[in-house]
Image (spheres, grey):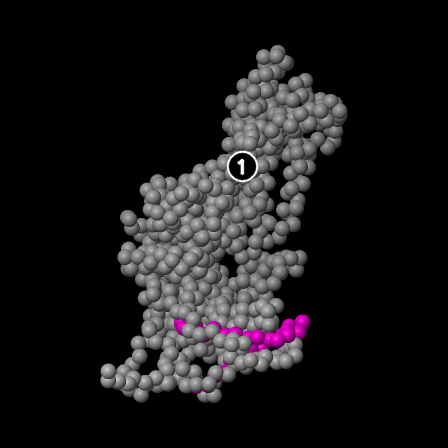
Amino acid sequence: MKPDNHEWSIEAKSSLVDLKLTEVWAYRDLLILLVRRDFVSFYKQTILGPLWFFIQPLFTTIIFTFIFGNLAGISTDGLPKPLFYMAGITAWNYFADCLTKTSTVFRDNAGIFGKVYFPRLIMPLSIVVSNLVRFGVQMLLFVLLIAYYYFTGANFNMSWAICLFPVVVILMALLGLGTGMIISAMTTKYRDLAFLVSFGVQLLMYATTVIYPLSEAMNKYPKYAWIIKYNPMTPIIETFRFGFLGEGSFSWASLGYATGITLLFLILGIIIFNKVERNFVDTV
Amino acid sequence: MSNVAIRAEDISKAYQLGQIGTGTISRDLERWYARIRGKEDPFLRIGEANDRSSKGSSDIVWSLKDINFEIEQGDAVGIIGRNGAGKSTLLKILSKVTAPTTGKITGKGRIASLLEVGTGFHPELSGRENIFLNGAILGMRKKEIQRKLEEIVDFAGIERYLDTPVKRYSSGMYVRLAFAVAAHLESEILIVDEVLAVGDAEFQKKCLGKMGEVSKGEGRTVLFVSHNMGSIAKLCSNALLLENGQVKLYANTSKTIIEYNRIASLSSGTEYTGIGIIKKIKITSEHNDINYGSSIIISTFFQMDIPISNITLGLVIKDSFGTSLIGVNNRHYQSQPIHETPLKQGVINVKIKNINLIDGNYNIDIFLGNSIIDLEIIENAVSFTVSNSYINKTNHPLDPSINKLFLDNIAWEYEKI
């Protein structure tokens, strides 16, 4: 055993923006193992196994096509309805899962956090990464659907904005992570906010352009559409859709705005998370 | 710092008592307001020492107050104290689970803390997968675990079940596996809470052996919290005695254990404020201290809403290593009951005349019941010290490690065949 004699200190106060990234790096194996745990334990003791990852977006798409597309007759910018909805659902699900899971990270892991120390940031990071794996699997389904419509000659074209796909994914991950960390840190002492999250995320979906295009909202409710427009998830989903399907209100300004908000939430999230992490065990 | 492994300076930790709810937010605001004006936290100022039995006037309690100590590299230190003395809080701070309210700890080397066995085990994953996950949570790298996998499996003795989900394990196997992972951590400082209280006797022995190996053989620093003075004495060279969140004594183990037992027996009886039936237990003798041959009275104060019929009281007297010496129960010693009619409250005094214990520290477990079952059992309810009683008529001192009792009526005679 090689002696490790680095000096350390534990103090009552610590820096708020110190991310301890070297420490997080030292625990990278844990991150991978946690992601693996989430992935494997999800389908253990099931017959369909990983197929379950497909079932949720598939059925949601069918239901949305039926209710919003046919029954309510909301426009889909001329795109095939299932394609339009699945684009929205796949992207939205990734953000929503990151947000809801990170927002309970302290409470869900109080048992582990209360007994052993490792950089707390590992937990929310593992959530974002394991949801990324899930998102990847669901993207596969989306790509299959695109291929199907492409060969049956539906009217849509991928655009150059598809190159922004990695940016869009990172933005969703960071926005979910940042918002989730803020909520998670704020719910260690007062749980009120936790109730808001579960139905708040659902409501937020309706304020994002998941089931309707932004252009439609602007046409019908020009007075209130700013709520939808200033929702940082809207430009992200619009860019996503514009990239893959060639329809959507894309502008650099709105994407820049979404990036700004994401960074703001992320920094705020990190500061609050760092502050709470040290003592939350006493109040959670 | 030359060869100091851990140095704690003025460590304090305040806790808030009671519920957290609507009422607390106003105080949080008040605190925050005080802070932005640069004033001292108004709620910490009125905090008081942590004495669990006396009712305090403030909601803030100091679980630890101005703790200072130094631990040398390679030293094995036992942390002892009564329930609520602050032992676990100290361990939590040392293992970085929670931050101190004030003060600073500095140290050298990697810390591994074992406050619980099997933290982060996932029931659905197999034994092998859990070894890796748990090891990583404790701070091991993957290749480090890989290298030690065989050793860990061997130590736990679960080879056959390695690829079975741990939810199918017996609780004993689960604990074995968990301890095995922790025991193979490579760290300079090892912090262990009373996790050894689980598992069968054989495994406990194995764990203690492993810990002894770690501290003595490999020269690592070990901090060990336990109520079992036997294991403390066996493992640790020095011990830190905490009382009401303060360091009462930090000296060699035997000296500290004696002091611990002295405080425990000095107290005017132990009070129990919970929902239990037993409210207080007190031990008295005709003199101030208890010697060989003293008569002692163990008083148990009880109270219950429903009358207890045919009340029964048993005691087990144990030595400081936790070995039971004798168990007495009124049903074995007297044919008539303690009281004929059902009782709701009162005191039961057990009088023992001429106690024939030699010098040392003893603990008593109390069993209170009716004619059918034990209603309440309190382990280590009271402790007492038998002192300066060198009873023997000769000048040959007794070996305390093999003697607890001294017989009055014993004789050696020679008989010719």
Q: Position of residue A186 (x, y in %)?
A: 59, 49
Q: Quadrant of residue B397?
A: bottom left
Q: Residue at x 41, y 86 (%)?
A: B293
Which of these two is toward me, B92 or B69? Answer: B92
Q: Residue at x 49, y 67 (%)?
A: B83
Q: Give me the residue at 24% from left, 82% from top.
A: B417
Height in image: B403 above or below B91? below
Q: Residue furthest front?
A: B417
- Residue B231, image x and y in percent? 37, 65
Residue A275 drawn in magenta: no
Q: Name which quarter of the figure residue A75 lies in.
A: top right
**Residue corresponding to mark 1:** A45
Q: Find residue B365 and report its horizontal and vertical position in percent.
A: 49, 72
Most extreme residue toward the left is B416
- SS assignment for the magenta stretch, majority: strand
Residue A190 seen in this snapshot? yes
Inspect this view and state whether residue A125 appears: no
Q: Is residue B191 left or right of residue B312?
A: left
* Residue placed most toward the observer, B320 or A154: B320
Residue A189 lies, in percent from the top left, at: 59, 53
Q: Residues within 10 Å of mark 1 (few under 14, many from 20)?
A: few
Residue B352 relative to residue A196: left or right: left
Callout 1 secondary element: loop
Residue at the (42%, 63%) spot, across then down: B225
Q: Nearer the viewer, residue B209 or B227?
A: B209
Tell which subunit mark 1 falls on. Answer: A
* Position above or below: A51 against A280: above
Looking at the picture, which amino acid does disc 1 mark? Answer: Gln
* Magenta-span inclusion, residue B309: yes
Look at the image and give the residue range highlighted in magenta: B294-320
Q: Nearer the viewer, residue B410 or B21?
A: B410
Does residue B314 sit above or below B166 in this rendering? Answer: below
